[in-house]
Amino acid sequence: MNHRPIPAERLPELLRRMPKAELHMHIEGSLEPDMIFSMGQRNQVPLNYPSVDALRQAYVFNNLQEFLDIYHAGTTVLKTEQDFYDMTCAYLARAQADNVLHTEIFFDTQTHTGHGLSAEVVINGLHRACMDAPAKFGMTASLILCFLRHLSEEEAFECLEQALLLRDKIVGIGLASSEVGHPPEKFAKVFARARELGFRLVAHAGEEAPPAYIWSALDVLKVERIDHGVQAIHDAALMRRLAEEKIPLTVCPLSNLKLQVFKNLSQHNLGRMLDAGIVATINSDDPAYFGGYINENFTQTFAALGLTSQHAYTLARNSFEASFLEASAKARLIERLDGVFASLE
Ligand code: HPA
Ligand code: ZN
């Protein structure tokens, strides 16, 4: 929608205030160091770091795998359904403060079943927080189960089987963890099964791995959105396809910066993606590890790339359009977004 352009100094406030959806956020990556310590104490899980500050100072990564190793260590403190509920409520409170009106939360059951927990404990805790989200945090929340791609397809099938007991609590299936060497094709059969079962499908692709991974996420897994997808920039035919077929990308700029996908934010290709007509969105990925929640991603990226209020509107609108909400809910949220932009003077 057209609106009066606003001066650059008022842009950060608009970015914070505008309604938005978050579509790429791993709930285990929202576990802040102080919560890791308090849950560790509550559950008597020893940690390899002497203090909250020492843990935070360890958050320096050269690539995705270095991050995944430390992220995994953080997840060991989660033991009970209440832990999963509390972690999710803490994220929802932060998201509400950033004017997130809808969020689709990633989680990896396999991380926790690998620590001896049941899938029920995990999913019931997360889901109870999602059910409380409208009353407690003025927003809606749903769950997307990500298979861990460094594990086998057989293990992903087992994970899907366990989740089927709680089918109605999960909206979609995704694919996360170590990307290079674990291409989408490895999960062709289990994604086909998830599709038959009526799950919405997404996959991380083209975060570190080449455009071929994005092609096969689309053509083999038949996903509806691509998580990250920034490597598409190296393939003109793929860029055209993403734009023509309106396949959303859930881009996570501060994650890309922290994991050294881009050396600095001013080199990020989000602006070029938008210029190419791609339905890109901004998200926080693992906010406790990557230096900020969604609004921090917006404000830093806009400052680095010189994006405008028109880009802000497009990104927020894309976030609602690309969500798995039904059409009437999307329309209501877009109306609220339009209200904010219409009132700009
Ligand atoms: N990439 C892949 N897997 C992940 C990520 C990520 O950024 N965060 C949590 N799991
Ligand atoms: Zn991710």
Image (tube, rainbow, N blue to C red):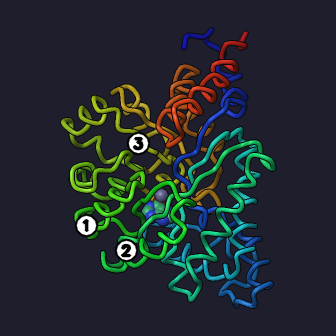
Residue under numbered circle 2: 156
What's the residue type where badge 1 is placed?
Answer: Lys
Distance from Cα at disc 3 to Cα at disc 1: 23 Å
Secondary structure under tag 1 reads helix
**The C terminus lies in which quarter of the figure?**
top right
Asked if 50 appears above or below 172 in the picture, the reply is: below
Q: Which residue is at the front of the view, 296 or 94? A: 94
Q: Which mark is residue 249?
A: 3
Position of 141 compared to 188: left or right?
right
Q: Residue at x 42, y 74 (%)?
A: 161
Q: Which mark is residue 189?
A: 1
Q: Which residue is at the front of the view, 131 or 246? A: 131
Q: Earlier in the sequence, mark 1 or mark 2?
A: 2
What's the residue type where badge 3 is placed?
Answer: Leu
Q: Position of residue 26 (x, y in %)?
A: 55, 60
Q: Mark 3, residues whose alpha carbon is within 10 Å: few (<14), some, or many (≥20)? A: many
Q: Mark 2, residues whose alpha carbon is within 10 Å: few (<14), some, or many (≥20)? A: many
Q: Which corner quadrant of the image does residue 128 belong to?
A: bottom right
Asked if 288 appears above or below 214 in the picture, the reply is: below
Q: Which mark is residue 124?
A: none
